[in-house]
Each structure stands twice: as C-alpha cells, then as structure tokens.
Amino acid sequence: MPGLFVTFEGGEACGKSTQVKRLVRRLEKQGRTVLAVHEPGFTEIGSAIRQLLLHAKTGNPMRIETELLLFAASRAQLVGETIRPAIEKGLVVVSDRFYDSTTVYQGIGRELDLTFIKALNEFVAGGCKPDRTILLDLDVAVSRARQLRRVRPVGQQDRMERLSDEFFEQVRRGYLKIARAESERIKVIDASGTEDQVEEAIWNEIDGVLS
C-alpha cells in the first residue's frame, strides 16, 4: 500500500496528542503500519532544539527570527531522517504539528514575513506535503481552562504556552484562514466535544483518504 502523511494542527491543549494516539490505534487495527512523530523534536537533534525552544532558560531572550529558524531546523531533520523514508516504505506517518504551525505561530502570530516563511517551509519539507491535515479548533478560553487541568508542576508552562491570549486569538484566526484557503487538505474539527466525538469526526475524514 502507498504511504500516507497525516498532520494534526491546532492551538494549545486542543487534544492533538490524545487524538494522534487514537488515530494510530484505529489505523493499526486496519492493518496499516503507522509511525507517530511530533514537532519540534522526535529525532535526537530535534529533541535538543526542542529543549532550547521551549524549556531552557537560555531560550528566554530568544529573538523571533531565531525561533523561526530553529523550528525549521528541527523539521528539516525530522523530514530527512524519519518522515520521508517512512512514507517511501509505505507507512502511514501521523505528525503532531508540521509546517502549518510555522505559518500560523511565527508568520501570523509573530508577524514575520509570510512570503519568506512559505519559501522556508517548502525548502525544509522538500516536497513532503501532508495528504490530510486535521485542524482541531478550540476557543482560547476553553484552551486556557484545559491547560490549568493538566497534571504538571505549578508554573511549568513552556515558553510558547506563556504567550498572551491575544497571541493565541491570532493563531486561531490564522489557522482558520489557511483552512479556508486549502479546504481540500485541511479539515476543521470542533475540538470542544468529547474525546470519542472528536475521534469519530477525525476518522470520517481519514477513512475517506484511505478508501
């Protein structure tokens, strides 16, 4: 069977990680070999970049241009080392974030040059375009409430999670804008429902691609 590339996008605490796991289980029950990856990170080099981007104190004064290029560097390693070889072998690759995150977070949220970001994304992805992107859409207020319920040490939000609600409103609007522009690839799922409801809505979209 040919390989398939599925990506998940959305704001903080929208349920991406949970739904990635659920989708992987359903695909494996159908006999598909699945590889789940995440951004930034997954590779050894990407994990070191992730630590600097999200958790290291040395990353606090990071310029937004540096942030953009580090996310791109992590992705370049992930595509070349993992994603492309897996797709070529016929695997289904499911990624928690891909280049749409850069377009929205660094382009629309950070207001960096979108033309440059598009060219950077194309260079880094090297033709690796998702067959289907699932956008889990969630109101920012609900997102914040979910973050507060997460089991983690008090005050341990990462560097991106500490950004303002205004920033995340821009991120949400940005995601919906690119979803309208690429409606064949990007499918918007209401992430405010139960985990089971969201899973079924996602499966309806993915099952169509598989068939």
Image (cartoon, helix red, strand yellow):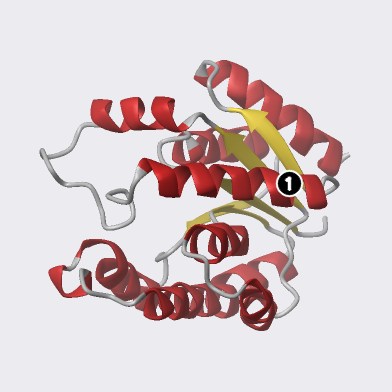
In the displayed structure, does residue 139 sit left or right of residue 57?
right
Q: Can you give x and y, in whole percent of width and height, for residue 110 in the image? A: 46, 64
Task: Count all numbered tags in the image, as a single digit.
Answer: 1
Q: Say which residue label 1 marks.
A: 179
Q: Name which residue lies at 33% across and 55% down.
A: 160
Q: Amino acid at mark 1?
A: Ala
Where is the C terminus found, in terms of image quarters?
top right
In the displayed structure, does residue 182 sit left or right of residue 83?
right
Q: Can you give x and y, in whole percent of width and height, for residue 2 in the image? A: 82, 59
Residue 209 lies, with reference to residue 95, above or below; the image says: above
Q: Describe the element under mark 1 as helix, strand or loop.
A: helix
Residue 99 visible here? yes
Q: Can you give x and y, in whole percent of width and height, for residue 61 in the image? A: 22, 74
Residue 53 lies, with reference to residue 100, above or below; the image says: below
Where is the N terminus found, in terms of image quarters?
bottom right
Residue 117 lies, with reference to residue 103, above or below; the image says: below
Q: Can you give x and y, in whole percent of width and height, for residue 65 in the image? A: 42, 79
Judged from this view, the residue extending furthest toward the right is: 211
**Residue placed most toward the observer, 119 or 2:** 119
Asked which quadrant contains residue 196, the reply is: top right
